[in-house]
């Protein structure tokens, strides 16, 4: 005989689920002209991309630990964050060059 265990349903808001992501400032500079990363983090946070922490990576790079809400899937990539920062700074976004083999 197989018996089922009780199922617990947890109600919550879709907004309570967030994703954490690490963003390299050096890599972000390939897409935008980030001069001052501390000001950039303030502007990104004001736009809704919450920068939780600025980490040092071996003294060579700064890494932003950001929290992305589920309604902003466009921020789940370095290009998406670069696009947002370029828009905030009224800059041109440098798009990556992609070469495909035929």
Image (spheres, rainbow, N blue to C red):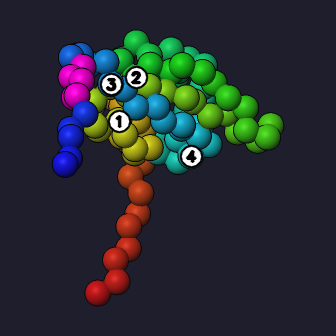
Disc 2 to disc 1, C-alpha distance? 8 Å
Q: How many neighbours does mark 2 have within 10 angstroms: few (below 14), some (14-19), or many (20 or more)?
A: some
Magenta residues span 6-10
Q: Which residue is mark 2?
A: 49
Which numbered disc, 4 or 1, marks the residue closer to the eye?
1
Which label's residue is closer to the chain start, 4 or 2?
A: 4
Does the magenta portion include 9?
yes
Percent coordinates x, y for residue 75 in the rendering: 35, 35
Query: Tag 3's secondary structure?
Result: loop
Q: Residue furthest front?
A: 1
Alpha-carbon distance for marks 4 and 3?
27 Å
Q: Are marks 2 and 1 in contact (CB under 8 Å)?
A: yes
Which residue was labeled with disc 1? 75
**Residue at 40 percent of width and 22 percent of height:** 49
Q: At 34% from the left edge and 83% from the top edge, which residue is drawn? A: 101
Residue 88 painted magenta: no
Residue at image mark 3: 17
How many neighbours does mark 3 have within 10 angstroms: few (below 14), some (14-19), or many (20 or more)? few
Mark 4 lies on residue:
27
Q: Are marks 1 and 3 in contact (CB under 8 Å)?
A: no
Front tag of 1 and 3? 3
């Amino acid at each position: 005989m197989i018996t089922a265990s009780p199922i617990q349903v947890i109600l919550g808001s879709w907004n309570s689920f967030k994703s954490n992501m690490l963003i390299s400032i050096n890599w972000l500079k390939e897409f935008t002209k980030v001069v001052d990363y501390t000001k950039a983090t303030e502007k990104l946070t004001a736009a809704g991309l919450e920068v939780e922490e600025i980490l040092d990576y071996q003294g060579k790079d700064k890494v932003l630990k950001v929290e992305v809400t589920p309604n902003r899937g466009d921020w789940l990539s370095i290009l998406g964050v670069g696009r947002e920062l370029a828009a905030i700074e009224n800059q041109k976004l440098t798009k990556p060059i992609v070469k495909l083999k035929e």
